[in-house]
Each structure stands twice: as C-alpha cells, then as structure tokens.
Image (cartoon, helix red, strand yellow):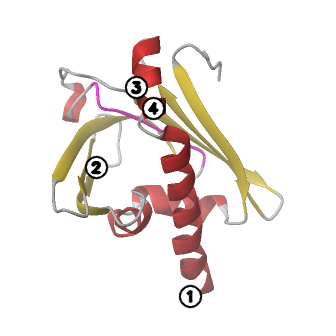
Amino acid sequence: MNINPQTDLKIERTIEVSPELIWQAWTNPEYLKQWFVPRPWTISHCELDLRPGGLCSTTMRSPEGQEFPNVGCYLEIIPNQKLVFTDALGADFRPKENAFFTAVILIEAHGTGTKYTAIALHKDEAGRKQHEDMGFFEGWGITIDQMVEVMKTKEAQ
C-alpha cells in the first residue's frame, strides 16, 4: 500500500500474537472493548457488523464519564489479513459529514507472531496533523500493547 506522508499516519510492529488472535481482537466486540482505547478510557458500546457496508460503531468513555461515539462502516474485509473501515460513511455506505479518517489494518504472519500495521488515511495534511497532534502514535501504540496483553490471555486459555 502506498503511504502519502502528507496525509497518512502509519504505525508498524512485530508482535508475538498470532494473526488469528489479532483478527479476533479487531472483530469480536467483547475483545475490542478491552483494549481499543488507552486506559483509563473505556469503550462503553461496541457494535460490529463484519461485512462491506456493515456498521462499525464504538463509543469511547473518558474517565470523567463523557462519551464520544464513533460510527462508520467497513469497506474491505479479508479474514486474518486486512480490515478497512471509515468514518466517512455510515452503515450501507451512507455518506456522512465530518469525515476524519479511513483505517487500514494489515495483519501478516511473521515467524511465530504477526507483522501488524495500522494506517490512518486522511483527506488532507491538516487532518493528518490534527490526528498526529491528538496523540496518534502514543495512543495507538498504547492500544497495541493493550491488545497484545488481552490476546495473550486468550491464547493461554
């Protein structure tokens, strides 16, 4: 995938969790709620309709109890390999206002673990800068660590 440094953000890691478990972390609402936002934030609601055009909805809750809904739809789904979703569209590809980004999650077997890549595509440089200033690298890095922690406990079960 071609990355445009003017508009896109990318974080890539090799992690010691299988691609299948990473896929479950992203596609099972009960797992996603456990890691998707940096603690002490939480996910109070999660609804995933895993199909192109299917609803992808999460609500982030701050430690003070404020809620921030995020509603979008899935664009591409390749089990255990690739997940693409956007907030530019709602369920069934219905256009929305105030699009922020499209996410591309790439999952690739690497030894006994996974090469994990998360890409945030923005419509312009201002959107990319806003996301970076909001703490994209730190926040997404923390959630990757949390995802690994949660899924390693699932792996041990």
Disc ID at residue 49: 2
Badge 1 element = loop
Task: Pick the quarter of the image with the N terminus.
Answer: top right
Q: Amino acid at mark 4?
A: Asp
* Quadrant assignment, res 74: top left
In the image, residue 116 sits, relative to residue 72, either above or below, namely below
Q: Tell me how far mark 4 sits from mark 2, CA to CA.
A: 30 Å
Q: Tell me how far mark 2 sits from mark 3, CA to CA.
A: 28 Å
Mark 2: few, some, or many residues within 10 Å (few <14, many ≥20)?
A: some
Q: Which residue is mark 3?
A: 130
Badge 4 element = helix
Q: Which residue is mark 1?
A: 157
Q: Position of residue 84 (x, y in %)?
A: 45, 35
Q: Which residue is mark 4?
A: 133
Q: Tell me how far mark 3 sits from mark 4, CA to CA.
A: 5 Å
User: Which residue occupies 33% across, 26% down?
Assistant: 100
Which residue lies most toward the bottom here? 157
Q: Earlier in the sequence, mark 2 or mark 3?
A: 2
Q: Earlier in the sequence, mark 1 or mark 3?
A: 3
Q: Earlier in the sequence, mark 4 or mark 2?
A: 2
Badge 2 element = loop
Q: Amino acid at mark 1?
A: Gln
In the image, residue 147 sits, relative to residue 69, either above or below, namely below
Q: Position of residue 33 (x, y in %)?
A: 34, 65
